[in-house]
Every structure is written in C-alpha cells, then in structure tokens.
Amino acid sequence: MLLPNRSVGLWMACLVGIGMLLLGGCRQIPAQEGHEAPTVDGQRVVFHVEGMSCERCEKAVRTAIADLDGVIRVDTSLPSRRAFVEFDPARLRPETIAAKLSRLGYDPVCETPELRTASH
C-alpha cells in the first residue's frame, strides 16, 4: 500500500522539476532589506549580461543589482543571460546599474529601447 503513494510522490516531484526547467530558470530577489518601497511607479529596464554563464554569476548579478539604492525588484534568467530590473527613477539611473555590472567584470547591454544609452 505504501508503494503507490511513493510512486505518486516521485511522479509529482518529477513534474515539478520539469515545470521549473521549462520556466527558463528565472529567479527573483527582493530589493535590499531596509529600503522602503518607493511611492512612485517603478521603471523597468532589461540588460543582456554578457559573461553571466553559471549559477554563481547569476547570483552575483542579482545580488549586486539588488544592493543598489532604488532597486524595487530584480529577476534574472541564466539561459537568456538577462537581468530584468524594476527601479525608482528618482533614486537610481540605468547607467548606475550598468556601471556596477561592468565593475564586476560583466558586459551589460541595455535592451530597453528608450534607455539604450544606459550601457557602455
């Protein structure tokens, strides 16, 4: 009687794992703790982050961006090598995000058409 329950659990675990893989590995990290949410609507920018090639790099990119004052939310996708950033434009500029990633050794390219000058 335990065997069917175990096999159902194993199948469920496999389905969840497959679902996670199909979602493209997108991960989210909240903005730095202690920073209050801005009262204005956030602006969004997308960076292609050349050099983000492993999970350790992805975590470094997420953490570096999240630590910037004015970041509301950060999502990263390792398969597409992209960072999706929502930020308060009164407190942070996309150029600052790009500069931070450059200092870490990555080559960020802004993919948001109206903000393309935000990367080097």
Image (cartoon, grey):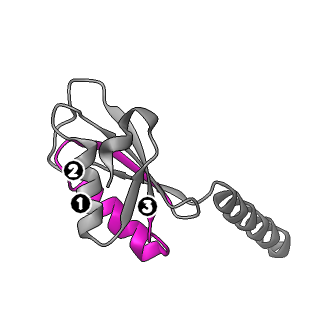
Closer-to-camera residue (18/95)? 95
Q: Amino acid at mark 3?
A: Val
**Percent position (x, y) of residue 60?**
33, 69
Q: CA distance from mark 1 to mark 2?
A: 6 Å
- Please name the residue that numbered disc 2 is placed on: 96
**Percent position (x, y) of residue 6?**
77, 72
Q: Are marks 1 and 2 in contact (CB under 8 Å)?
A: yes
Q: CA distance from mark 3 to mark 2?
A: 14 Å
Indicate which disc residue 49 carries. 3
- Please name the residue that numbered disc 1 is placed on: 100
Q: Amino acid at mark 1?
A: Lys
Residue at (69, 57) in percent of width and height: 22
Relative to 26, residue 4 above or below: below
Give the image quarter of residue 89.
Answer: top left
Give the image quarter of residue 85.
Answer: top left
Circle nearer the N terminus (3, 1): 3
SS of the residue under disc 3? strand
Q: Amino acid at mark 2?
A: Thr
The residues colored magenta run: 50-77
SS of the residue under disc 1? helix
Closer-to-camera residue (81/22)? 81
Q: Is residue 74 magenta?
A: yes
Residue at (51, 61) in percent of width and height: 81
Relative to 17, residue 37 above or below: above
